[in-house]
Amino acid sequence: MPKTEYYKELASACIQDKRDIVISEYSSGGYTLAQRLNVEEGNKKTSIYIKNSIHIDSVDGLLNLRDALNVALEKINVDK
């Protein structure tokens, strides 16, 4: 039986040397915020998703996350 549920990666950003934060859309609704570990062995790259991602129900939730990140950046005076 084919798998009908899937994640579509929308964006990612490097958060540590070998870790990314990944925002994906879930085919059954909502979004996830997950951590991905990237390992390179020679010329082979392996990506491992860390368990316990954060589920966000709606676009409004993503907007609230964006706003919270902006507030946090303002509080630590990051200007880029």
Image: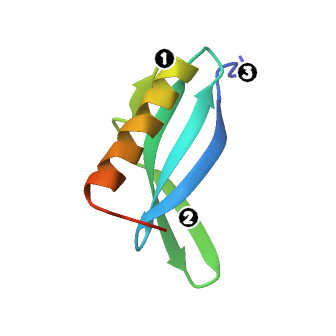
Q: Earlier in the sequence, mark 2 or mark 3?
A: 3
Q: Residues within 10 Å of mark 1 (few under 14, many from 20)?
A: some
Along the horizontal axis of the image, is 3 left or right of 57?
right
Q: Is residue 71 above or below residue 59?
A: below
Among the 4 quarters of the image, the one containing residue 45: bottom right
CA distance separating discs 1 and 2: 29 Å
Mark 1 lies on residue:
57
Of the residues shown, which amino acid type is indicated by label 2? Thr
Q: Is residue 20 above or below residue 62?
A: below
Which dot, 1 or 3, sits closer to the camera? 1
Q: Where's the N terminus, which quadrant?
A: top right
Which dot, 1 or 2, sits closer to the camera? 1
Q: Earlier in the sequence, mark 1 or mark 2?
A: 2
Secondary element type, mark 3: loop
Secondary element type, mark 2: strand
Of the residues shown, which amino acid type is indicated by label 1? Asp
Q: Position of residue 74 (x, y in %)?
A: 34, 53
Q: Position of residue 56 (x, y in %)?
A: 45, 24
Mark 2 lies on residue:
46
User: Measuring 64% from the left and 82% from the top, which residue is drawn there?
Assistant: 43
Q: Is residue 4 above or below residue 68?
A: above
Which label was assigned to residue 2? Answer: 3
User: Measuring 65% from the left and 28% from the top, which residue is drawn there?
Assistant: 6
Secondary element type, mark 1: loop
Q: Earlier in the sequence, mark 1 or mark 3?
A: 3
